Image: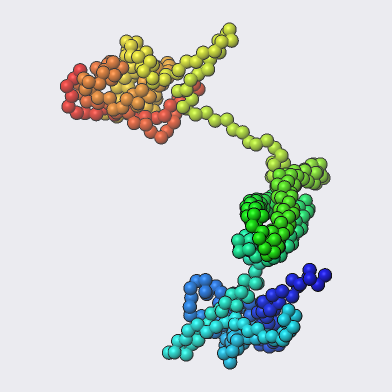
Amino acid sequence: MITQLKGVTENYRERMQRLALFDPLFRLENKREKDENGQPIDYFGYGLLTLLFFFENMLIRNKKTSIQDLAKYLYELNRGEYSLSLEGYEKVARAVVEAFRPPSGKRNEKTYYNWETREHETVHYSILKADRADVTTNTQYYKLDEQGLELVFATKEYFTEFQLSINQLVLRKQLEKGEFVGALRQIDEMHIDVESLRNRMTVVKHEIQRNIISDETYERYKQMVEDINARLTRENEEFSELHTFVKETKNRLAYDMNSEKDRKAYELILQIDRELGEVHHIHTMLLKESIDLKTTALRAAQEALYYVGISSFNFKQEITAALVSKPLPLVASKLLTEPFLMIEQSESWSPLVIFSEQRIETKDGGEHTNDFDDLSDEALQELENAKVQKLFGDIMNLVLEAMQGRDAISLKEVIDHISEADSDWLKRPIFYQFWYVMHQRSPISFEKNEERNESLFKEVLELVKYQYSSIEVEELHEIMTVTKRFSIQNMMLRLIVGEQDGL
């Protein structure tokens, strides 16, 4: 029994030295000083803040950190918690620094009885050390010593979730160096890590089933489960590599057992292979559980969250009773029922629809599509005929008649003039086609090489070619509803004077 528990006192001095690092903090806690209002000063807390203050200054490469700097930081951090002046905080800062680094210059020490060596021993440690000094201002600067950094790291659980991965790396190094006894102990620690991980996963599973009451908590637990699964996957890959390494070592030792030492080494590697397999099996089961947790438990929790929301809502009590039992203003009633109404739908119509393909169904049920005034090559060929030229010429005559000798006129003025003289034009699509084709081709000049303009606007150009060189049509912002069937954007037509050769 004693032989199996010999690891209890192993490295006792090292463990005691790590515990001794906390002694200065507990000595600070025993101080009974008070502030100006008689409130006890939290020296223990200020001791930890001092460690973190020097640690952060090391991170930002600030090599000039004095007691006065520490006092200013504590004073700014206070914000009325304690009734202390800047001088009072300088006294606190000096007491804390002296606890971590005695004024005598000697290192802190702790005497204890070593149960491994059966002797009284003393360990020395240094939390703070003097860095440099400013002779002109008589200022001493300090920074954390190596054991001070260890104390800072000991206050935060940096590597708990990666402890198994760290043990895997240590085990590989021990196997490479042939330290098989240490490797067996490392596997025992891995057993503890895996069991601890199993307990944490059990807690997470119960928390998922009990605590997911909102989408925020669901997302938080989802991320937690994904992190656990990713870590277990990486660790499982490392276990596979360790198995391969142990197998190669076992095969190598099997062919080289010339001494008692080699035989004991082979027996140890067989035991390592067996116990590592047990740990790996338990870990593989955890990986499977994490996958189930990720796919099953989270989905069940999400569905439960949905049905809890449904079952907890009583429409009769929450909505009907509120509307019927007491008279509510119309606005309040509308706001109460609005979430249960259909989403508002509005119909809108775009003028661009007239240029899209039209779906037409005949009497026999067949369908065909016609392009409504599409300005494709085929449509242009259809427009370029004598009938369209004649109609465009007639419309231009009406425009010139409305202009009464002016060089520019708006479409609105033309429509007003036509409605007084002959409103039949405003019911015909050709009138509106004339304007949007004119706007599309604008400016329309009288050059011989513009064959499209000659063919389509031949009669139009004949009416104005002796006085003007080109026609420009520019759109305006106003949209006019001319009839129930036709609406068009207002335009400005201008006749431009210039040199021209005639047609």
Determine the residue positioned at 67% across, 63% down: 259
Residue 300: where, in percent of width, then height?
75, 44
Toward the viewer: 431 or 8?
A: 8
Query: Left of 393 or right of it: where is 243?
Result: right
Reply above or below: 265 against 87: above
Of 154 and 473, the residue lying toward us: 154
Query: Residue 66 in the image: x percent, y percent?
Result: 52, 83
149, above or below 483, in the image: below
Residue at the far front: name it: 258
Compared with 258, 148 (above or below) is below
**For residue 501, above or below residue 85:** above
Q: Nearest the camera: 253 or 268?
A: 253
Q: Considering the image in quadrants, where does the N terminus appear? A: bottom right
Q: How many marks?
A: 0
Q: Position of residue 145 (x, y in %)?
A: 56, 79
Taking the image as shown, residue 103 lies to the left or right of residue 197, namely left
Residue positioned most to the bottom? 104
Colouring: rainbow
Residue depicted at x 63% and y 86%: 108
Say left or right for 326 vs 458: right
Residue 171 percent coordinates (x, y): 65, 61
Confirm whether residue 479 shows in the render. yes
Residue shown at 65% from the left, 69% from the top: 156
* Residue at 51% across, 80% down: 65
- Quadrant that contains the C terminus: top left
243 relative to 129 in the view: left or right? right
Q: Quadrant of residue 135?
A: bottom left
Pick whichever, 392 or 237, lies toward us: 237
For residue 227, say whether it is visible: no
